Image (tube, rainbow, N blue to C red):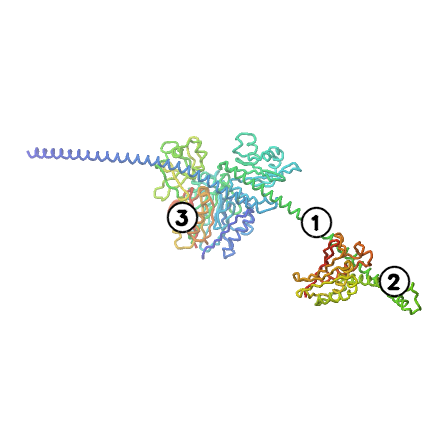
Amino acid sequence: MTNEYLINILGILTILALFFLIVSLIFKMEKVKELRVEVDNLKKSLDEMDEQAKLIVRTDMELNKTQEELDKKIIGLYALQRLSRTISTTLEENQIFKMIEPEYLEELGFERAAAFLWDEKEKKFTLQLSVGYLNDEAEIIKSSVDKDHGAYLDVIRNERTISSISIPKGTFLRENLCSLFKANDFVISPIMPKEGSKGFLFVGTQNLDITMTEGDEELITIFCNQIGQAIENARLFEKIWLSQQDLEKKVEERTRALQNALNEVKLVSKRKNDFISAVSHELRTPLTSIKGYASILLAGKLGDVPEDMRLRLDKINRHSDELTHLVNDLLDISRIESGKVTMKRETQDLQRTVASVADLLSVQLKEKQIELFLSIPDDSRNVLADATQISRVFINLIGNALKFTPANGKISVQSQKVGDEIQIDIVDTGCGIPENAKEAIFEEFYRVENTINEQVKGTGLGLSLVKHIIEAHGGKIWVRSKLGEGSTFSFTLPQS
Amino acid sequence: MEIHIGVGASSESDEITAVREALRQARLKIPSERIDLAIIFTTINFSYSSILKTISLYLKDTPLIGCSGAAVISHKGIFKHGIVIMLLNIPEGVYFNTASVTDIKAKGALNAGEELGEKLLYGFQGVRRDFGITFSDGLIDETSNFIFGLQEKLGKSFPLAGASASDDLLFKKTYVYYNQNVMNDAACGLLWGGKLNFGLGVKHGWKPLGKPRHVTKSNDNVVHEIDGYAAANIYKDYLASDLENLKKEIKRISILYPIGIYLSGEEEYLLRNLLAIRDDGSLVLQGNVPEGSQIRLMIGTKESCLLATHQAIEEVMLGLGARKINLLLVFDSVSRYILLGRRAEEELKIIRKTLGEDTQIAGLYTFGEQAPLRAINYQGVTRLHNQTITLVGIGG
């Protein structure tokens, strides 16, 4: 009984346990189901995220490519700017290519470069630049370029850049260029200065990772334009420099010739002065004797002098005076010219000087009924001059005016202050001076051809002497005149 | 006694002038006449033997190691054409040994690594070895195996930093310098011991993108299948491109979207650059990818790159504590140089701003960097990296 009871209880318990187990299993299965859904969701999310990752990678790749392109362009532009700045710093043609640094070219994406200029006389290309090549390699390139110069001259003639972009792969030209210049990608662009020899620049790279773009082609074209411009500037500068050198040489030669001529003139002038001085001195002695003997004869100290003889002796006496006068003038001019006479500069009252001269000439003035007017204001009254010499200036100039002014004419002497100098004008109403004689009258022994000069004797030394005296004072003299309307002689003297 | 280091740099086009100028600058920073070690980095297109000859004229038999790079880095700037020379005057208590290995391809990278390790250890008995620097030809396919070989001799978790030499991005020839020898298919190394204080920083800044995937078939640095499909499908899918276009764009893809290997416990993914895509759809990577590895496609930007530079310097500073940095060696991936483009100098600016304008810097752009990933406490295993900036700070 007891056993049966126990078995029943155990059976019930087993059933209950089974029940709970089944219920728990059902719950677990539900949980597993839920977890499976969760795992599926997570797997789905992971797949979705993986898909997103793919999108990210693709976008990132595109962005990086764009960035690389941009970087390359910026670096290229910087390099181009630096290159342009560098080559523009020289004005020597043979220095331009030497200034193209390999590192700048590398920044442009090219580790190899060669530049050539066409020599029209020699009919061959000359190598100006070689980067990334050994000497032997550069020689091979040079001789090959010379051999096929026609093809390279075409690049220059057509003024067109060619590159591994524009020449299709597999063509003979491209393969030839690639193998000659040892490059996988390249650009060849003409260098076109306006005048003189033109050429081309080759730049290339062996790096297969570098993708050449049209932008690279453009950069190299711009760079070649700048090289062309730099060469042009250098040539222009050289031309200007050479012509300047030529000019300087000519100026130097001319100056030397003029200096020689001047020295010659000075020498001649000195000889002339020496000669005049010597001759004058030699003339003076016999003249004094002639004049002395004539005076003795005229005075009747050697017996009576018949009228005819007196007349002749008078003439001898007068001519001797004139000759003495001439010799004295000549001597003065010669002395002033050679600097033997120093002007003793003192304050001179123009009013007084002119008045004393007028006094001296009063007889002649009266004879010809000529009025002499003085207009010397106080502010232009005093000059710094040698008293004797300045009197001679006035005697000569007023004397001349008197000589060439017809009777009843007018002479005026005026002074005015001009800057630091005093200008004196001697104005007459005489016959005037022809235009062509205005300069010559100041030369020695020059005499204007006119009726008065034919009648009145003169040495032709007066104005020359005046000019010498004025210039020795640091002043200048000139004349304004019109035939038949009188003359104005003006000169300047330092103010006192 | 403190280690004295002088760095000189020159961008003169004539190598003899450049060496003289760089040596003069470097010497100025060293109070002693004695130079114990020279490290040099050069760009391509120099007469390398002429460089080494000129240096030997001044430094006689001073041990020298170095390699070539697409550009050299110094506190004077980044030179696309230039030379950087470091001269070291090493105090008592600090030991070093240099060695080289040649014919790596013929010997096998693993064996060559072991040979270099052995040579470096020679003469180091009884001295605690601290740290190693290696420079190797950047065009060796199996640099990962070379490092494994070194680790066989120096210890699995021995801290190593190094650079794979690079050229002017034509991937034609890179150079390793050892004493007066200019070498290809070779590597050289430097082992430090004693009381040298140094800090390491390695960061790349690339982030994982998309679903995690698994390498189902690979052989060293060639990944044949990913998730049972041809490995190249990962790039075909993400870039919506066919095999031909992918091959054309390989350089850009390699820089922008490398493969990242997930390493359990490491902070950053280990990056692998794409070297080639084979016609069967397999990917040739710069460095090994073990079968079963979890990988991700990685994405990087200029900003993330520069942020990584910042983080790498912080790691160096953490490693050195309060000590002043005497010299900062920079092994910077050429990929970063290309990606940053005009902003490449910004990395240098960040370094100088953080460490001070007077910090001496010497480095180069590399085809691969070697460093432990978890660099802060040096416990990480040294690996071959791509796309990183690897910094080694040598303290006073």
Q: Quadrant of residue A351?
A: bottom right
Which quarter shows the C terminus of chain A?
A: bottom right
Q: Quadrant of residue A420?
A: bottom right
Q: Amino acid at mark 2?
A: Lys
Residue A173 percent coordinates (x, y): 56, 31
Subunit ID for the residue under disc 2: A
- Residue indicated by mark 3: B310
> Considering depth in this image, is B180 or B260 the residue closer to the camera?
B260
Is residue B114 visible from the viewing direction of this image?
no
Subunit ID for the residue under disc 1: A
Question: Mark 2 and mark 1 in contact (Cβ < 8 Å)?
Answer: no
Question: Mark 1 and mark 3 in contact (Cβ < 8 Å)?
Answer: no
Residue A312 percent coordinates (x, y): 90, 62
Q: Is residue B352 left or right of residue A496?
A: left
Q: Residues within 10 Å of mark 2 (few under 14, many from 20)?
A: few
**SS category of the residue bearing label 3:** helix
Q: CA distance from mark 1 to mark 2?
A: 60 Å
Instruction: Tell which tag, 2 or 3, sits nearer the viewer.
Output: 2
- Residue indicated by mark 2: A315
Q: Residues within 10 Å of mark 3 (few under 14, many from 20)?
A: some
- Residue indicated by mark 1: A250
> Considering depth in this image, is B12 or A353 the residue closer to the camera?
A353
> Considering depth in this image, is B220 or B285 the residue closer to the camera?
B285
Q: CA distance from mark 2 to mark 3?
A: 126 Å
